[in-house]
Amino acid sequence: MTEAFARLGEWMTVLLMAVALGMDAFSLGVGIGMKGVGRKDAVRIGATVALFHILMPLIGISAGQYVGDLLGHLARYASGGLLLLLGAHMIFSSVKGSGFQSIDHRTLWGVVLFSLSVSIDSFSVGVSLGMFRSDLLLTVLAFGICGGLMSLMGLALGRSVGPKFGEYGEAAGGSILFTFGLLFIF
């Protein structure tokens, strides 16, 4: 029974992190959606974001496992510190303003740039999770599904929601990652 609770705790942690990381895709999706985006473009953007939210943490987890082996028991503090920094950066960016520059979402290069920009955080979290030897399949699927769905939600809501809502979403995601960083350390 104790193992079942531990497994449930791991799933909840990964799900909350996936949602927190998806906030970037959501907030930038709101911005693009406010400019107008067709269904075909929205599906292409959502699928590409989902793919990048799978690839980036895979790369990060591999790097994290290597770093975890090097750091040993200090890996806990290093991964917690990474989450603290990432969460603080997301909060700061939402308060300061993202300085979002227009990306042409109708071009392949624009979709790739957008997807990469909202998935970079997934790499850092992947490094942290790699130090803990988390469930690889669960992690990357949760990150991919949440990233793709949240970008679609942001695109869909962009027409009816003001830009401030997206900034609040990024701040909320940063707060979640910051909290997990504290929990990892203490």
Image (cartoon, rainbow, N blue to C red):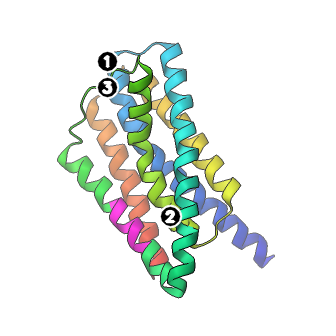
Q: Which residue is mark 3?
A: 103
In this rendered view, identify the residue nearer to me: 32 or 16: 32
* Viewport quadrant of the N terminus: bottom right
The amino acid beneath tag 1 is Lys
Instruction: Please state the horizontal and vertical placement of residue 29, each as a whole percent of the image.
Output: 40, 30
In this rendered view, identify the residue nearer to me: 119 or 19: 119
In what element is the residue under mark 3? loop
Q: Give the residue drawn at x 77%, y 75%.
A: 3
The amino acid beneath tag 3 is Ile
User: What span is colored magenta in the figure?
Assistant: 80-87
Q: Earlier in the sequence, mark 2 or mark 1?
A: 1
State how many labels appear.
3
Q: Is residue 32 left or right of residue 49?
A: left
| Cα–Cα gap, marks 3 and 1 | 11 Å
Q: Which mark is residue 35?
A: 1
Cβ–Cβ under 8 Å for marks 2 and 3: no
**Residue 143, above or below 161:** below
Q: Is residue 84 magenta?
A: yes
Q: Give the residue drawn at x 45%, y 22%.
A: 108
Q: Give the residue drawn at x 61%, y 41%.
A: 145
Instruction: Please state the horizontal and vertical placement of residue 49, each as a whole percent of the image.
Output: 50, 35
| Cα–Cα gap, marks 2 and 3 | 28 Å
Cβ–Cβ under 8 Å for marks 2 and 1: no
The amino acid beneath tag 2 is Val
* Viewport quadrant of the C terminus: bottom left
Q: Which residue is mark 2?
A: 127
Category of crowding for the residue at label 2, using alpha-carbon neighbours closer than 10 angstroms: few (below 14), some (14–19), many (at least 20) = many
**Residue 105, above or below 186:** above
In what element is the residue under mark 2? helix
